[in-house]
Amino acid sequence: MTENTQPEMTEPTSYRKELIIGGIVVVAVIAMIATIVFFIANSGPKVDYPPTVACNTLTTLEAQELLGNSAFKSADDPAVISGDLATSRCGYTDGSANTETMIVAAVILRAGINDKGVEQNKTEFEQGIPTQGVDNVNDLGDSAYFNRANGQLNVLKDKNWYIFSYGQGTAPENNTIEDVIALAHKVI
């Protein structure tokens, strides 16, 4: 009868197997991490058009031309992406300590970051026009109207929807169409 004996594993053979198994585990972990990074990178909206930021359109110098040399920035919100749009705000005041008489110049900018967002801006701009208290404004952007109830000028131009306000901060309904158009001309 012959004895069933297996040759004893030598140290280098055992080490080689552990090295191969370790290499397979490392490759699998790297592949999983790469897959996770790929899905995270592609999970947000596709940004085809870098968003325009409101304070890049209304500079301090332009605000001073409207409000005087004491004008200072009161709002500078970066573009925040939500869905297919990016929204930013920019505001300046005349520097008055009296909030009752303070004059404010402000821009809210809603930018389409891809074709879907541009189309959404156009659709919601058109659907958002009030049925009363509105003056159409010609020769400003692609479409524009002044809402007398809130003293705001809405302008649709290219990929962007601008909302302008210029006048007494505590009573924006008293803003005049001429003043707000003057602000818009500084930006657009």
Image (cartoon, grey):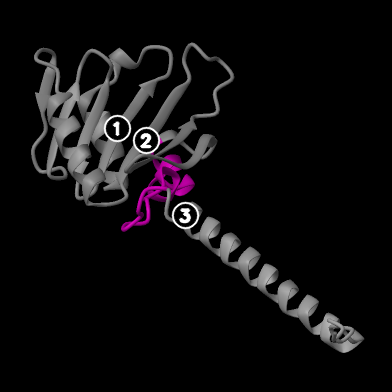
Instruction: Report if residue 71 is visible in the image.
Output: no
Quarter of the image with the N terminus is: bottom right
Q: Where is 2 relative to 86, above or below? A: below
How far apart are the alpha carbons under marks 2 and 1? 6 Å
How far apart are the alpha carbons under marks 3 and 1? 35 Å
Give the tally of numbered discs.
3
**Looking at the rendering, which quadrant does residue 6 occupy?**
bottom right
Secondary structure under tag 2 reads strand
* Amino acid type of the residue tagged 1 in the rendering: Ile
Mark 3 or mark 1: name the one nearer the start of the chain. Answer: 3
Classed neighbour count for the residue bearing mark 1: other residues with Cα under 10 Å, few (<14), some (14–19), many (≥20): many
Q: Which mark is residue 109?
A: none
Instruction: Report if residue 18 is visible in the image.
Output: yes
- Badge 3 is on which residue? 39
- Badge 1 is on which residue? 163
Image coordinates of residue 33 in percent, x first then y, are 60, 61
Image coordinates of residue 124 in percent, x first then y, are 19, 31
* Amino acid type of the residue tagged 3 in the rendering: Phe
Q: Which residues are magenta?
A: 44-66
Mark 3 or mark 2: name the one nearer the start of the chain. Answer: 3
Classed neighbour count for the residue bearing mark 2: other residues with Cα under 10 Å, few (<14), some (14–19), many (≥20): many
* Amino acid type of the residue tagged 2 in the rendering: Val
Mark 2 or mark 1: name the one nearer the start of the chain. Answer: 2
